Image (cartoon, rainbow, N blue to C red):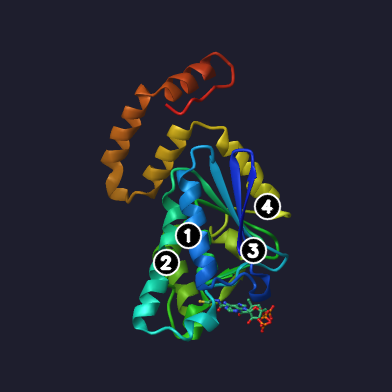
Amino acid sequence: MTVDVARDGAVAVVTIDRQDALNALDVETLTELRDRLRELGAAEDVRAVVLTGAGEKAFVAGADIRYMSGLDVEQAKGWGALGHDAARLLETMPKPTIAAINGFALGGGCELALGCDIRFASSRAKLGQPEINLGIVPGWGGTQRLARVCGIGVAKELIFTGRTVNAEEALRIGLVTAIADPVLDRALETAHELAGKSRLALSLAKELVNMSPGALDHESQEFGALFSSEDAIEGLTAFAGKRAPKFVGR
Ligand code: COA
């Protein structure tokens, strides 16, 4: 078992466990991760997903370099597509995904974290896109998502130099939103908080935030349409009634 899925109530914790290679992703591990994420995205009773790495040292130290060194062009395209699938599932599943970055998040590891909606880092975390030092480029969405999360200038500097950043710098540049030890506790706390909110409103918020700035019209339409939901009526009236809302997902 290289990808463990544990349940903590409505929260699923996905742990990548290949510690002898600092949780670097080979084809078996990445395929398993993609498959588990697909299941969790579809599971109605899972309301939030936390992604982390096993052990003390690494979140994910990247794609497996030994595996990649033997790939021809067609195989490399398939490898890129598999990583894209995993990152896109994290980005688009209709529930929040949180990266608990407990150590090295390099290359593909940083890209999986960037696919998540929220990133928290332990104080020992190190993040970056060192592909340039291997003569390649980020291939699982890093060129786009790092620029979206941190701005194009930061993304270019990090991708061009391959420099890694520590947790403090990651926080300063917006690559993570908090530093916490143990980071998994912080991720679980937020995941449980989000699991208690309206599933309907949260999934729409995610979809809207993911859209390009050109989608402002869509936002106003969807914002209005949401007011016909039981959850919006409940949430808005509960506030006025000074009571906690009870959301039903409709
Ligand atoms: N792919 C394959 N194996 C990896 C790996 C990766 N991305 N990252 C680490 N490993 C393996 C190492 O080869 C080593 O295996 P070995 O014991 O069989 O030799 C083991 O994990 C431990 O790594 P090691 O380099 O000894 O640990 P370290 O603490 O000295 O250094 C890193 C840690 C993360 C700085 C270093 O492993 C590294 O630079 N890894 C590659 C990171 C990278 O470029 N990722 C992007 C790939 S696109």
Screen quadrant of the C terminus: top left
Q: Residues within 10 Å of mark 2 (few under 14, many from 20)?
A: some
Marks 2 and 1: CB-CB under 8 Å? yes
Q: Is residue 37 above or below residue 55?
A: above
The residue that disc 3 covers is 167
Q: Position of residue 16 (x, y in %)?
A: 61, 62
Q: Position of residue 76 (x, y in %)?
A: 39, 78
Residue lying at 42% horizontally and 21% vertically, measured from the top left: 230
Ligand 1 lies in which image quarter?
bottom right
The residue that disc 2 covers is 82
Q: Nearer the viewer, residue 95 or 148?
A: 95
Residue type, numbered disc 4: Leu
* Mark 4 or mark 2, earlier in chain: 2
Kindly identify which numbered label has been placed on residue 184: 4
Residue type, numbered disc 3: Ala
Q: CA distance from mark 3 to mark 2?
A: 28 Å
Question: Which one is closest to the eye, mark 1 or mark 4?
Answer: 1
Marks 4 and 3: CB-CB under 8 Å? no
The mark tally for this picture is: 4
* Mark 4 or mark 3, earlier in chain: 3
Q: CA distance from mark 2 to mark 1?
A: 8 Å
Residue 180 in view, yes or no: no
Q: Could you tell me which secondary element the residue under label 2 belongs to? A: helix
Residue type, numbered disc 2: Leu
- Which quadrant of the structure image shows residue 58? bottom right
Q: CA distance from mark 1 to mark 3?
A: 27 Å
* Mark 1 or mark 4, earlier in chain: 1
Residue type, numbered disc 1: Arg
Residue lying at 36% horizontally and 75% vertically, measured from the top left: 77
The residue that disc 1 covers is 34
Question: Which one is closest to the eye, mark 4 or mark 2?
Answer: 2
